Image (cartoon, rainbow, N blue to C red):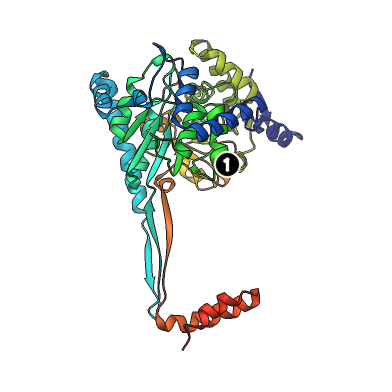
């Protein structure tokens, strides 16, 4: 059912590369449909958004007759917060507090700076928040209040004044926990639209929706294709691939725990990836037995079975050092280091979206309430990108205040370089300030 590999095998690298291979869907039908929707919304604005929303979300009672009917008031958000069970409300509040505390600390490390040179020239960098961001939240059966917290709270902490959340409501069903999370996270406006038309409205603006500076948040293939196409008109966070977990284990953790941690990502969808690296062959066999015994107890066992069969693996490595080297090559979204002394192995890791250290740090805790963001790079992009954070909702402006004395030195250098590039006006602009 699940692939078993040994790093000592001659064809190990080839088989591992085959297992890891994943390319985002570029279905021609999806790309064509998305292209048409984006162009139509850009041309017709609200009328197109309303038409597509009524059609794709199957809104009851003949559908919405105006964009105003698709707005969710702050009063409705607060009512949702008051209406959900107390246990859910408290869980959302605790999670939000922890996510906010982490990102407040993150913000402290991102302040701008200035310094003054000996001749009085002042140089530096100013950090300012984006004015307006759009947050896409999946709706209907796939409802993720945790993603509302993870996307909206760092934007709020960064100082973004307008946080516009779009969420589809198929068949008119509104998820109260999603609305409650929006109330807690400081979302300023919620609009019940989704799909490529929502991305288009956020990117280009309509009569009733002001264009945003950046769009973040997960969605289906149509949303991903739309985000890819509007990048450049607005910023985006990333194009997320299937969820991933990589567990580096020294063989001391309860094998049931490891099996369930593998399940926790495999249950997302059939393309999710779950891999174990361990130097102990006997322990790997115990984990395999746990998988066989526990899988029938899982409500989403069919999804897990397909995921593990297609993209899962139990890999025997020579030692923990080799496990860390392979982990750096995989650059997983979620990396668990389940070992007696996890820090010594964590020091060897360069590429991972998030690291979970020690046997009690299950990845599932990070999905909901640890504090660090659960929006993470996938498909080996952790080699060059980072988790969603406060920095995604800020921009940097250089500060250059040249003194009269500084202009005498810098002007000669700039003029020399400008003449070398054949840009005489640049050179003369600098030289006019020379004494």
Q: Which quadrant of the structure image shows residue 124?
A: bottom left
Q: Does 27 sit left or right of 113 as displayed? A: right
User: Where 296 falls versus 418 (above or below)?
Assistant: above
Where's residue 78, x and y in %? 24, 26
x 50%, y 34%: residue: 200
x 49%, y 38%: residue: 376
Where's residue 229, x and y in %? 57, 38
Crowd band around label 1 with a 10 angstrom C-alpha radius: few (<14), some (14–19), many (20+): many
x 37%, y 79%: residue: 120
User: Where 312 falls versus 115 (above or below)?
Assistant: above
Work out which residue is located at the far right of the displayed protein and give it: 10
Residue 292 visible to an observer of this rendering:
no
Q: Quadrant of the N terminus?
A: top right
Q: Nearer the viewer, residue 64 or 251?
A: 64
Where's residue 220, x and y in %? 53, 26
Residue 10 visible to an observer of this rendering:
yes
Where's residue 257, x and y in %? 47, 24
Element type where label 1 sits in the image? helix
Residue annotated with mark 1:
381
């Amino acid at each position: 059912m699940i692939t078993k590999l040994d790093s000592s095998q001659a064809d190990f690298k080839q088989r591992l590369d085959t297992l890891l291979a994943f390319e985002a869907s570029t279905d021609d039908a999806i790309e064509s449909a998305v292209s048409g929707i984006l162009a139509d919304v850009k041309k017709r604005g609200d009328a197109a958004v309303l038409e597509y929303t009524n059609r794709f979300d199957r809104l009851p009672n003949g559908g919405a007759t105006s964009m105003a009917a698709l707005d969710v008031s702050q009063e409705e958000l607060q009512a949702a917060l008051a209406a959900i069970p107390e246990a859910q409300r408290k869980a959302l509040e605790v999670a939000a507090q922890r996510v906010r505390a982490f990102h407040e600390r993150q913000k402290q490390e991102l302040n701008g700076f200035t310094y003054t040179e000996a001749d009085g020239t002042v140089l530096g960098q100013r950090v300012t928040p984006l004015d307006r961001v759009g947050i896409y939240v999946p709706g209907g059966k796939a409802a993720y209040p945790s993603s509302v917290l993870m996307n909206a709270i760092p934007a709020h902490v960064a100082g973004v004044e307008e946080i516009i959340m779009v969420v589809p409501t198929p068949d008119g069903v509104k998820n109260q926990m999603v609305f409650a999370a929006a109330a807690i996270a400081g979302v300023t406006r919620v609009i019940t639209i989704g799909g490529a038309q929502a991305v288009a409205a956020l990117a280009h603006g309509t009569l009733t929706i002001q264009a945003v500076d950046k769009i973040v948040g997960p969605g289906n293939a149509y949303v991903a294709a739309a985000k890819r196409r509007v990048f450049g008109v607005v910023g985006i966070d990333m194009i997320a691939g299937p969820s991933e977990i990589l567990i580096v284990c020294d063989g001391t953790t309860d094998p049931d725990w490891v099996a369930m941690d593998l399940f926790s990502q495999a249950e997302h969808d059939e393309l999710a990836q779950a891999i174990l690296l361990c130097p102990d062959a006997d322990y790997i066999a115990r984990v395999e037995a746990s998988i066989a015994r526990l899988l029938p107890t899982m409500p989403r066992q069919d999804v897990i079975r397909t995921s593990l069969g297609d993209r899962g693996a139990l890999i025997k490595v020579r030692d923990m050092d080799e496990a860390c080297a392979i982990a750096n090559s995989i650059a997983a979204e979620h990396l668990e280091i389940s070992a007696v002394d996890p820090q010594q192995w964590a020091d060897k890791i360069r590429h991972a979206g998030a690291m979970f250290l020690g046997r009690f740090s299950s990845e599932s805790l990070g999905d909901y309430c640890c504090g660090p963001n659960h929006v993470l790079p996938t498909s080996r992009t952790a080699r060059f990108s980072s988790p969603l954070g406060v920095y995604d909702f800020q921009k940097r402006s250089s500060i250059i205040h040249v003194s009269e004395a500084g202009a005498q030195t810098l002007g000669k250098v700039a003029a020399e370089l400008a003449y070398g590039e054949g840009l005489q006006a640049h050179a003369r602009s600098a030289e006019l300030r020379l004494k």
